[in-house]
Each structure stands twice: as C-alpha cells, then as structure tokens.
C-alpha cells in the first residue's frame, strides 16, 4: 500500500526540476539551450545565453575582493526573464530571502508572482548571492555527501527541547561541534560570502549592464526587489551606494541592525499576534474552523490550544502505525511549535491547516503532523530526504544561510557560554511564547565556532539616519509579520522612503491577494510614484474560505516554507 509520505514524495518530485544534464563545454554556447549553469560561459562582462525554458543566463566573474583583485575571482549567477515590452525600463534584481535562498530558482519557478506584483515593464533577474546555489564560493560543510548533509540538517533542528536544561547543554555543544566541523571542511574563501560583497556584485551588474547599453557606468542604478533576508541585502546596498539606488522595493522587513548586531532578538516580536489572530479568526469562522467547539470567545479557543501544547510537553504522542511511519517515533511540543511557526508565515492560507492539525493533536492523533513535518523537511518516523538519501540535490541552502549570517555578524556574536545560551532562549521565549524557543535554534547558536572573518572592506559599517538615496525606497509589510516586522524601524534610515502596509498576516506581500497592493507596486515601478504615507491596503482573501479566484489576477500565496528557508 502507498504510504502517505510516498504520495507527498511523488507530488514533491513532480514539482521540482528534473536532474540537470551536463553537456560537454563545446556543445553548449550555440546549438543547445543551457540546462544548467555549468553550461553557461564564465565571463567578466555580461554575456547572456539562452537557458532553461524561455530564460537567459549569465555567469559573471567577479573579484572575491574588489579592493584586492590579486586574491582571485568567483562567479555570480543571473537568470533573466526578458519582458516582451522591449526596450525594458531596466532589470529588477530579485532576492527571495534566506540568507541562502536562490534568486535564480525563484525567478525560474515563480515568475508569474513577480510579474503580478510589478507588471511587465522590466526584465526580471534572479541573482544567486555569493555562496548560494549557482554562485561561488561553494559553501557546503559536507562536500560530496548531499545525503549526509540533508540527514544532518533534518535531524538537528527538532532535536532539542529548550525547556530541558540537559538538552540545552547538549544543543550548545552540538552547535559548537558543527562550527568546528565546518571550519575543517569549508574552503577559506567562504569568508567572501557575505552581504556587503553581494551588494557590491549588484553594483557590478548594474554598471556592466549600463556599459553594454553604451551608457555611462558611473550613473548606473540598481533596480531591486528583496523580501525577508532580501531586506538586509537591499538596505545594505542602499547604505553603501545611496547614489546608485534605482527603484527599490523592500518587503518583509528585517531589523537589519539586529541582524548585523548578532543578537537576532527582534524577529519574532509579532509571532504571538499572528497566533492570537488565529484564535480570533477561528472564532469568527465558527464551524468553518475545524478547531471550533462552540466557544463563546477567542480566549476560550486559546485555552484549548494552549492545553494541547502543554499536554504534548507533558506527554509526547508515540506514533507506531506502520501505515503512517517507517519506524516508530514520538511527536513533541517542539514539533508542534516548529510547524506552527512555519504555518504563520502565511495566515490566510494556513489557518485552516493549523485548525486541522490542533484538532487532531487534541485527540492525540498524529497522522497529519507526520505528513506536514515530512513536507517541511524535518521528518519524524520517516527517512530523509523525501525520496531517499540518494535523491538529495546538489545544493541545499542551510549551510549558506548559516555561513552568510555568521559572516555578517562577525565580531558581534556573544553567546559564548551555556548560561548565556539559556538567557538567550528565555529572552526569546519572553518575546514569543509560541515561537521564541524554536526560533532561538534557527541560526545564532551555530555561529559559535564559525570563525570566518570577512575582509574589513566587506564588513558593514552601520546605518545612518535619513540617508539621501538617488531615488526614494518603498518598504512594504503586512500588518502582522511573524518573523520580520521592522519596516517602521528601517524606513527612517532612508530619506523620503515610505512604508506601504497590507492588512494581512504573514511574511511578504505575496501571502495575500490585494489589487490595492499590486496597484501601488506596479505604479511605483512604472513611474516612481510612492503611495501616500500611512497607506494600508486591504486584501481580497477571507480567512477560512480562501479561494484561488479571490483577488488579483496572478499574485499567488507563499505556502509553507521548508525548514531550510527559516530564517526568512
Ligand atoms: C550535445 O547537446 C545535445 C542536445 O542537448 C545532446 O543531445 C548531446 O548529447 C550533446 N553532446 C555532447 C557530446 O555533449
Ligand atoms: C569538443 O571539443 C573537443 C576538443 O576541441 C573535440 O575533441 C570534441 O570532438 C568536441 N566534441 C563535440 C561533441 O563537438
Ligand atoms: C548558432 O549561432 C549562430 C550565430 O550566433 C546562429 O546563426 C545559429 O542559428 C546557431 N545555431 C543553432 C543551432 O542554434
Ligand atoms: C592583497 O592580497 C594578497 C594576498 O592575500 C596580500 O598579500 C596583499 O597584501 C593584499 N594587498 C592589499 C593591498 O591588501
Ligand atoms: C539551483 O538552481 C537551479 C537552476 O540552476 C534550480 O533548478 C534549483 O532548483 C536551484 N536549487 C535550489 C535549492 O534553489
Ligand atoms: C579554495 O578554493 C579555491 C577556489 O576554488 C581554490 O583555488 C583553492 O585551492 C581552495 N583551497 C583549498 C584549501 O581547498
Ligand atoms: C463558512 O464558509 C462559507 C463558504 O465559504 C461561507 O459562505 C460562510 O459565510 C462561512 N461562515 C462563517 C461563519 O464565516
Ligand atoms: C455546537 O452547537 C450546535 C448547536 O447547538 C450543535 O449542533 C453542535 O453539535 C455543537 N458542536 C460541538 C462541537 O459541540
Ligand atoms: C487520525 O485522523 C485521521 C484524519 O482525520 C483519520 O483518518 C484517522 O482514522 C485517525 N486515526 C485514529 C487512530 O483515530
Ligand atoms: C549580546 O550583545 C547584545 C548587544 O549586541 C546585548 O544586548 C546582549 O545582552 C548580549 N548578550 C549576552 C548574553 O551577553
Ligand atoms: C482585482 O482585479 C481583478 C483583475 O483586474 C478583478 O477581476 C477583480 O474584480 C479585482 N478585485 C477587487 C476586489 O477589486
């Protein structure tokens, strides 16, 4: 019989690209369309060749250190969709988050979402930042062993209960061992994978593009959309090269000072609000919400919800049904909390799933959570990755995420003892009682023994207030963002910038359908016109009755992120 996980495994396989074929280099430049960046010629000028289905690709050779070219070079990958409306108004560089997520993959897979947001006056260009997917330097702490890498990553995150003192200690030591391991298996060039260096590569792109069009490269501007970690990259660029800011939309906005400062305490400040809103919407939806049991207030729903978590903590659910799992396992409150965190990345879409999941957990039925944990890349009771170890892809974003973030916070990191780690976990649990404990495990601790030092010229100097940019920046945010709600903090660093809010719950504009939002974004890209200060856009989606027809024509929703994309 077909196991549930096998059904999902095949769904997932259908959704991902087929294995890349590698042709001999002399068979690539002309007669074939490149199917992999290995087939795209490396060049210090922008040389686009046809690639994949309907895209163009360039593999740009850049200095590892622009201030000391004797150190050597690396490559940066770009994948471009050319609008049929040529000449285009420009090339929008895209960053989907992470750090570690691939702009190339994002544009290749989600082009329609992006056209829905910005219209079609621009070419849309996915860029893999340094250290990510098709761009060098290669960051993989398990070279040649993708199955081992994915197994390690899938086991690490849900292993430790932050409420257990013994497990806090074990976690602290394990994270240190990870750093020691990577310092031995990674190439020293990993230190050049950092955000200021990637910002410099963006400038290089804009200058080369401008030159290729016969324009003065010193006037070249960068057009950009970045969400999540992309807000760190975008604000870094704008701070380092303010006179080179073209049209910039910065979405799902991280507290970038907190990011560089090494503390990572400002991410989940609205996470509990996103969960509270679930109680409210479940209450409003009555029997449309599967968790509703005729309660007379949202607070009563919350009491049952909290009781489920408390019960799981006291008594984890053993799972021993051979139709459900490959080997027996136990579901803990950490499993439930980590999925809850992932679900609130998009309240519009995922509230019904939270309701279903907690209804079953209340009955101590683990069937649904087993499925979702596997989908999220953190399986319990099933081998990993979905499809087996041999199906592990060449690239995984997990280690690039850690290395880039830890490089960026070099010198500021201070969780140096178990006591400080305990303090940090309690601080985060104080900020979010639902998600703080699991968020604490995402990044910071693993910086502990990662000792790469970016060259001084690639260390971020800090923000200045009210910095004048060549064109004002548009910041966008949902009214509740569970992991990055700092648009109002970041905007004052940039003169004349505006924050556009969307009345939705989740991370990034695309979690909801809103003609109002897409209208403002498209107008901004076309004309540079900013929305009036204080604008809040309503959305077309209704909680607990989301349909694909609601709202704008092509904007889609972000579903459940994989654990590897948390971060942002
Ligand atoms: C050349 O490319 C074609 C088309 O992609 C492919 O079928 C063929 O096997 C390649 N030949 C070599 C020698 O790589
Ligand atoms: C590729 O180039 C090599 C060396 O120039 C040559 O020996 C080989 O025949 C070429 N292969 C194809 C498929 O053109
Ligand atoms: C190879 O490139 C030349 C010139 O760029 C072009 O005319 C020709 O059609 C290409 N051949 C194929 C098979 O694409
Ligand atoms: C450039 O890098 C090389 C090799 O690491 C080093 O020897 C040299 O001192 C550096 N030059 C400058 C100007 O920093
Ligand atoms: C890496 O890029 C390739 C395209 O070259 C894409 O097919 C693949 O999905 C990307 N991998 C990830 C994990 O982003
Ligand atoms: C690090 O990577 C660079 C570039 O790929 C390579 O030239 C160098 O030999 C590598 N160093 C080590 C120690 O592997
Ligand atoms: C329940 O869902 C149906 C269909 O989507 C909708 O018509 C109805 O108004 C909803 N009920 C409540 C209480 O929201
Ligand atoms: C809720 O109340 C309705 C009407 O009184 C009743 O039919 C239904 O069984 C109740 N549902 C639950 C879960 O108690
Ligand atoms: C658990 O829930 C699933 C989905 O509702 C259901 O199919 C299954 O029978 C339940 N298992 C038990 C043991 O009740
Ligand atoms: C670490 O440094 C931050 C400021 O960067 C400070 O707020 C925090 O208290 C420090 N944490 C510890 C555990 O020393
Ligand atoms: C949003 O725009 C689409 C397409 O332009 C239109 O069909 C739909 O009615 C609009 N929805 C609202 C609520 O304005």
Image: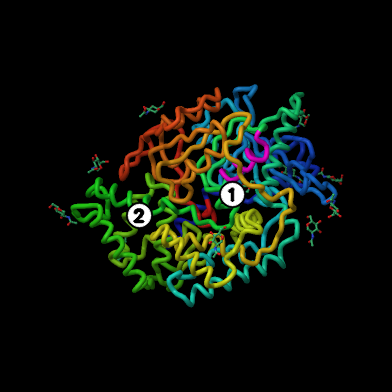
Give the camera-side residue of 400 and 559: 400
Q: Residues within 10 Å of mark 1 (few under 14, many from 20)?
A: many
Rendered view: 98 above or below 43 = below
Where's residue 418, x and y in %? 54, 72
Segment tinted magenta in the rendering: 231-242
Q: Residue furthest bottom?
A: 166
* Image location (x, y in percent) of residue 467: 60, 36
**Any part of residue 275 in sight:** yes
Residue at the farthest front position:
465
Question: Who comes first in sequence, dot 2 or dot 1?
Answer: 1
The correct choice, above or below, for 133 with respect to 382 in the image is: above
Find numbered disc 2 in the image and state the secondary structure of the residue it sits on: helix
Local packing at callout 2 (Cα closer than 10 Å; few below 14, some 14-19, many 20+) is many
The picture quadrant for ligand 9 comes to bottom left
Where disc 1 sits, the SS reads loop
- Name the residue tied to disc 2: 354
Q: Is residue 490 left or right of residue 79?
A: left
Q: Main secondary structure of the magenta part?
A: helix
- Residue drawn at x 18%, y 52% is 296
Look at 79% across and 39% down and name the residue there. 44
Residue 54 appears in view? no
| Residue 253 against residue 148 in the figure, above or below | above
From the top left corner, tell me how far across and down residue 476 is, in percent. Answer: 48, 37
The question of residue 235 being in magenta is answered with yes
Residue 536 location, quadrant? top left
Residue 373 falls within the magenta-colored stretch: no
Q: Which residue is mark 1?
A: 101
- Answer with left or right where residue 369 lies relative to residue 26: left
* Residue beneath the point at 29% across and 47% down: 281
Location of the N terminus by quadrant is bottom left
Which of the two residues, 507 or 328, is positioned nearer the viewer here?
507
């Amino acid at each position: 019989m077909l196991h549930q996980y096998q059904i999902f495994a095949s769904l997932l396989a259908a959704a991902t690209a087929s294995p890349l074929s590698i042709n001999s280099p002399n068979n690539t430049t002309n007669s074939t369309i490149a199917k992999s960046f290995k087939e795209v010629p490396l060049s210090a000028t922008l040389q686009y060749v046809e690639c994949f289905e309907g895209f163009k690709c360039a593999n740009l050779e850049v200095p590892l250190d622009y201030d000391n070219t004797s150190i050597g070079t690396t490559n940066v990958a770009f994948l471009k969709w050319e609008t049929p409306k040529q000449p285009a108004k420009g090339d929008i560089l895209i960053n989907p988050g992470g750090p570690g997520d691939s702009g190339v993959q994002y544009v290749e897979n989600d082009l329609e979402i992006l056209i829905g947001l910005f219209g079609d006056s621009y070419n849309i260009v996915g860029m893999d930042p340094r250290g990510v997917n098709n761009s060098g330097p290669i960051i993989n702490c398990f070279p040649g062993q993708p199955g081992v890498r994915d197994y390690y990553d899938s086991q690490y995150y849900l292993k430790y209960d932050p409420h257990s003192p013994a497990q806090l200690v074990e976690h602290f030591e394990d994270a240190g061992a990870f750093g020691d391991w990577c310092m031995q298996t990674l190439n020293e060039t990993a230190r050049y994978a950092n955000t200021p260096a990637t910002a410099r590569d963006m400038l290089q792109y804009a200058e080369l593009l401008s030159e290729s069009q016969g324009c003065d490269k010193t006037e070249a501007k960068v057009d950009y959309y970045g969400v999540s970690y992309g807000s760190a990259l975008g604000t870094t660029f704008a701070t380092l090269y303010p006179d080179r800011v073209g049209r910039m939309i910065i979405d799902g906005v991280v507290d970038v000072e907190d990011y560089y400062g090494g503390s990572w305490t400002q991410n989940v400040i609205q996470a509990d609000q996103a969960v509270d809103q679930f109680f409210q919407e479940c209450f409003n939806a009555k029997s449309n919400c599967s968790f509703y049991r005729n309660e007379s207030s949202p607070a009563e729903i919350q009491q049952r919800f909290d009781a489920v978590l408390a019960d799981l903590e006291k008594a984890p659910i053993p799972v021993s049904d051979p139709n459900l799992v490959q080997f027996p396992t136990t579901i803990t409150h950490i499993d439930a909390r980590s999925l809850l965190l992932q679900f609130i990345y998009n309240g519009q879409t995922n509230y019904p799933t939270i309701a279903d999941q907690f209804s079953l957990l209340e009955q101590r039925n683990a069937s649904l959570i087993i499925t979702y944990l596997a989908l999220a890349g953190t399986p319990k009771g099933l081998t990993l990755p979905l499809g087996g170890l041999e199906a592990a892809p060449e690239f995984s974003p997990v280690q690039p995420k850690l290395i880039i973030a830890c490089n960026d916070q070099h010198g500021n990191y201070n969780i140096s003892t178990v006591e400080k780690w305990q303090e940090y976990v309690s601080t985060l649990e104080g900020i979010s009682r639902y998600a703080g404990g699991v968020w604490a495990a995402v990044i910071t601790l693993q910086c502990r023994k990662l000792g790469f030092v970016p060259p001084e010229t690639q260390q971020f100097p800090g923000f200045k207030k009210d910095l004048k940019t060549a064109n004002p920046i548009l910041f966008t945010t949902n009214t509740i963002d569970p992991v990055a709600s700092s648009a109002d903090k970041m905007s004052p660093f940039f003169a004349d910038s505006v924050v556009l809010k969307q009345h939705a719950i989740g991370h990034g504009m695309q979690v909801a359908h809103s003609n109002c939002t897409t209208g403002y974004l498209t107008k901004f890209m076309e004309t540079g016109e900013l929305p009036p200060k204080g604008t809040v856009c309503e959305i077309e989606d209704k909680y607990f009755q989301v349909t694909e027809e609601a709202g704008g024509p092509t904007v889609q929703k972000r579903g459940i992120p994989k654990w590897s994309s948390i971060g942002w």
